[in-house]
Amino acid sequence: MMALFVKDFLLPSLGLCAVIAVVVACAAWLGYVINSIARSADALERIADALEDDEDVEDEDTEKEGGAK
């Protein structure tokens, strides 16, 4: 009786739980990767903005001096 319960109910349930756990783990990993890419893109955008602002300051300094450095 117990062997029949294990064979017919418990093993398929454990298999389904294992599949669900793998799917959840893959979804969490994908979310982590997408979040990492988004954070990297944001950091690169901030670096580019800082460099652009720095170039603007250098251009203003050049115009104030009346010529190229």
Image (cartoon, rainbow, N blue to C red):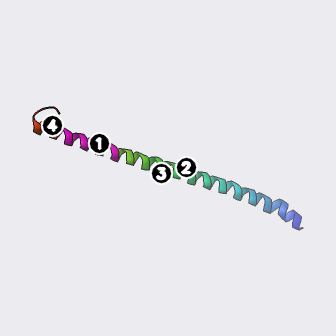
Q: Secondary structure at mark 1?
A: helix
**Magenta residue check for 34:** no
Left or right of residue 7: residue 52? left
Callout 4: few (<14), some (14-19), or many (20+) C-alpha neighbours within 10 Å?
few
Does residue 24 lie above or below 60 as drawn? below
- Name the mark nearer the viewer: 4 or 3: 4
- For the stretch drawn in magenta, the main secondary structure is helix
Q: Quadrant of the C terminus?
A: top left
Q: Secondary structure at mark 4?
A: helix
Which residue corresponds to mark 1? 51
Which of the 4 quarters of the picture holds residue 18?
bottom right
Find out whether the residues at labels 2 and 1 contact each other: C-beta distance under 8 Å. Answer: no
Does residue 66 lie above or below 3 as drawn? above
Q: CA distance from mark 4 to mark 3?
A: 41 Å
Callout 1: few (<14), some (14-19), or many (20+) C-alpha neighbours within 10 Å?
few
Q: Quadrant of the N terminus?
A: bottom right
Q: CA distance from mark 1 to mark 4?
A: 17 Å
Amino acid type assigned to the residue bearing label 3 in the image: Asn
Which residue corresponds to mark 4? 62
Left or right of residue 29: residue 42? left
Which residue corresponds to mark 2? 30
Amino acid type assigned to the residue bearing label 1 in the image: Leu
- Name the mark nearer the viewer: 3 or 1: 1
Residue 8 screen position, x and y as percent: 83, 60
Name the residue located 74 percent from the left edge and 56 percent from the top edge: 15
- Front residue of 22/42: it is 42
Residue 20 screen position, x and y as percent: 66, 56
Name the residue located 12 percent from the left edge and 32 percent from the top edge: 67
Name the residue located 79 percent from the left edge and 59 percent from the top edge: 11
- Name the mark nearer the viewer: 2 or 1: 1
Sequence-wise first label, 4 or 3: 3
